[in-house]
Image (cartoon, rainbow, N blue to C red):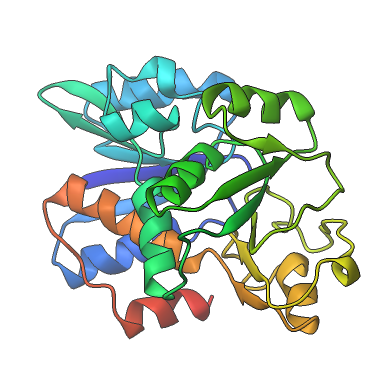
Amino acid sequence: MKNFLVIGNPIDHSLSPKLHNYWFKKNNIRAVYEKKLINIENIENIFNKIKKGELNGINVTVPFKKLVIPFVEKLTPEANKSNSVNTIYVEDNKIIGHNTDIAGFELSIRHIKYEIKNKKIFVLGAGGVVSSIILGLKNMGCSKIFISNRTTQKAKDLKNYFNDLEIIEWGKVPEFDMIINATSIGLQKNDEIKLNYKEIGSNKFFYDVIYNPVQTHFLKIAKEFGHRTENGKMMFIYQAHQAFTIWNNVMPKIDDEVIKLLEND
């Protein structure tokens, strides 16, 4: 029996066990996938379990995507480029840190047939997933990336990594085509991003990496103002699909049944 885990804090919102366990069953794989709430001091213990063979792989979510890097023995090019790890596996007795968020984001945008090329993108947040989103946006040919974060230093750290970013003061809004919430604001019921929606203009695209809840306050208000909206469900599915394939050497199906499975939570 194989054992897999997703680690994070908070972790209640994660639907990773639901999706992976569904795919295990569909593909007749003897494995179990669970979620675990951890603190930074628990990371070493998790990696010891991987070394002992008690865990076959893990996914990493907020806020540990950068914090796990010192514990892996090798980074894939994707993880190295993004300085972010969301998938961990063992290959040739080495613990490998990988990033499936870049591909997950790009595939989710292709899935909904939105054209990023030559668009101005405004990204809210500077956490572990943001570097992956920036790389995905650059791969798809956007013309400009603005970034805003509650802690300005974190935005500056990202600008050191991607020097063509333009930092926007938190609460201010530049002229954009697409806005992405890549913060954790929205995971809790009463979370609200303070934006002056009246001054944003029309026909914008609001994208939230959060997929549970299905509609955050950020998307709800945007929809009321007539903007196009999309949550992070497809990004979540596509990044999970890549991790599952790496761990099991089996490519699971992404179909209507999978999408409905997550909508019904």
In the image, 59 versus 31, the foreground residue is 59
Q: Residue at x 44, y 59 (%)?
A: 236
User: x and y percent of residue 222 in the render?
Assistant: 75, 74
Residue at (80% x, 81% y) in the render? 225
Going 78% across and 68% down the picture, which residue do you hit? Answer: 217
Image side of residue 91 versus residue 31, left or right? left
- Give left or right: position of 230 versus 242: right
Q: Nearer the viewer, residue 244 or 129?
A: 129
> Residue 142, position in %: x, y?
50, 53
Q: Is residue 112 above or below residue 104?
A: below
Q: Position of residue 229 (x, y in %)?
A: 63, 75
**34 relative to 171 in the view: left or right:** left
Residue 262, compared with residue 245, is above or below; it is: below
* Quarter in which the C terminus is drawn: bottom right
Work out whether 168 lies above or below 228.
above
Where 30 falls versus 75 (above or below)? below
Percent position of residue 20, x then y: 32, 60
Query: How many tags in the picture?
Result: 0
Q: Nearer the viewer, residue 27 or 164?
A: 164
Residue ID at (34%, 52%): 103
Would you say 89 lies left or right of 217 here? left
Residue 18 seen anywhere in this rendered image of the structure? no
